[in-house]
Amino acid sequence: MMSSLDDTSECRAEVLAIDIGGTKIATALVAADGSIRRRQVIVTAAHTSADDLAARLLDVVSGYDLAAIAGIGVGTAGPIDYRRGVVSPVNIPAWRDFPLRRCIEHSTGLPVRLAGDAVCGAVAERAIGAAQASEWAIFMVLSTGVGGGYIADGKVLAGRLGNAGLVGHMVVHPGGERCACGQLGCLEVYASGPSLVRRARAIGWVGDHPAELLAACRAGDALAAQVVETAADAVALAIAQAAASLEIELAVLGGGVMRSHDVMLPAVRNAVARRMRDGVVSPVNVVGAHHSDDACLIGAGLIVHRPDLLTLSSRNNAAEL
Amino acid sequence: MMSSLDDTSECRAEVLAIDIGGTKIATALVAADGSIRRRQVIVTAAHTSADDLAARLLDVVSGYDLAAIAGIGVGTAGPIDYRRGVVSPVNIPAWRDFPLRRCIEHSTGLPVRLAGDAVCGAVAERAIGAAQASEWAIFMVLSTGVGGGYIADGKVLAGRLGNAGLVGHMVVHPGGERCACGQLGCLEVYASGPSLVRRARAIGWVGDHPAELLAACRAGDALAAQVVETAADAVALAIAQAAASLEIELAVLGGGVMRSHDVMLPAVRNAVARRMRDGVVSPVNVVGAHHSDDACLIGAGLIVHRPDLLTLSSRNNAAEL
């Protein structure tokens, strides 16, 4: 019988956090206050087999002092099914319905909790970041993709299987550009880093990196400004949806694109004011995230330290809770 | 000191439910199984004063045997602030920040719980209707307006102040027609009963009532079919948003427009299939509501019988819980 994750005394110990992304896996020890140490990174090759990749991860995990660890939290690219403890990260083709939770539990003897990466990020911002004072909020990551998490009554909504907060695939322009996912006009088509660059190049801008584009916008480049404004408006539409559906009062924006927050924050705030100006929906405050780079890793630790900040399905997940 | 709403023994008794709409107020006794009796209706005139309207309501309320009642549940048109217990229904100009909860509590000596009308409807469908088996769902009312409620982990999300589920004012077409609320392209502009008629008449259809329009669609009228398809697509976009944001598996559609469910349900299902076909978002089942006409009244009773089915803000509402 594994020890419970909810034992208060254990919550004082450190948690091993694992952040599984498309190109790399990060691990670290996370304390209850969110501080991290002993970070390690594994670069994942696209052609690794399921078992090889798991073996590399378990090798790194076994290098930590497992006897001193309260539990293991995993934040992962999706889709996932946390009820079964399986993951199928889009960018890790070797793992399809891969039983990651059981795999790590068997190897370590420690209890493992699993959530989506952006859900973990939202937990980090809720616990020790920009959403500490807000119980109804949306967290958005503008990065290579666009993800997020909804905070309702102070808790991040993990969703039925753990895949809530897929804000990158909210349709903001129904007749818009086709997304890689197949839908038309997803937020990600307008507001991810690669989309910013692609859309700017399509209208004649010359450059390769989102940071360059945002710098060009800062310097007054009209093409760059046009693309940034479209992105900001798309983000504002997603924020307005969250306000109409869940009566949120706060939007927390993180991810690589938001490193240029001096450009992005005013653009999104203006778009939100324009879109929601006359509406019956309550106004939303827009702020930058506190933990852009480490939000998922910190959050993967905090879902073990602070399970009260996460709404998982209460049904069919005895193994989880 | 008023008795607690959460006492199990009291939950066996009946609750007085009050459904406050734009043109009428309905009251009834609601049992724990959702059955209703002794219904009464007050027609509200637009020019009544705040106190006159309250006095008429309290007069009806005092006609019930209050000694046999466990508590009072109010479902009301919004906006509301349930933390303060005040209501400002758009179509009742006499009530602006009107302290309805305190007013009824003082008059009756009974505890009063307050929620939005569509939130109450969602509670009814969750407790004894089409969403009984689903813990992640959206409820939508297509009626004079469009409202709704989100069900997450089995509970209806009331929102920060009680105004969540404002699905009628989700922007589905950002460059679309202006809504009465001021925003462009709200769902309500495409899918409410009056909008169906207005949009059909604008392209040459002759008729006055949504039911006529849906009958014309059923009979093969091309203009009617075009308007219904646009409405169904707008509803599908809102369902897709809910699926991306909260990973819902079920959409429950109610309200007057859905009385023609043989026309509307297939249209919405086709639109959902088309919109979400290739996406990464999990599929959503679309069904009709079980309690179209009485959902709010039943739900107003059930928020007292079953407070466990409602997520209110846990902070700042000692008076409520």
Image (cartoon, coloured by chain):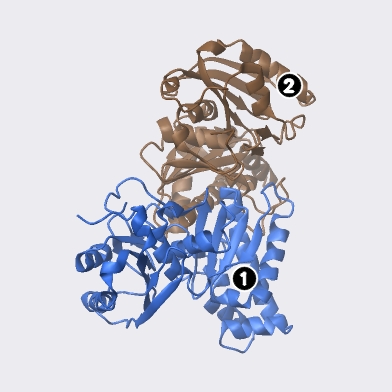
Chain colours: A blue, B brown
Task: Judge left or right: residue A262 versus residue A111.
Answer: right
Where residue A53 sits: x, y (%)?
Answer: 26, 77
Subunit bearing disc 1: A
Q: What residue sits right under mark 1 in the picture?
A: A231
Residue for point 46% across, 52% down: B272
Subunit bearing disc 2: B
**Dot 2 amino acid type:** Leu
Where residue A49 sits: x, y (%)?
Answer: 23, 78
Q: Is B203 situated above or below A300? A: above
Q: How many marks?
A: 2
Residue for point 65% across, 62% down: A286
SS at badge 2: helix
Q: Quadrant of residue B26?
A: top right
Confirm whether residue A185 shows in the render. no
Residue for point 57% across, 59% down: A131
**Dot 1 amino acid type:** Ala
Where residue B1 sits: x, y (%)?
Answer: 58, 22
Q: Quadrant of residue A274?
A: bottom right
Task: Judge left or right: residue B47 versus residue B285.
Answer: right
- Farthest residue in the bottom direction? A206
Q: What residue sits right under mark 2 in the picture?
A: B53
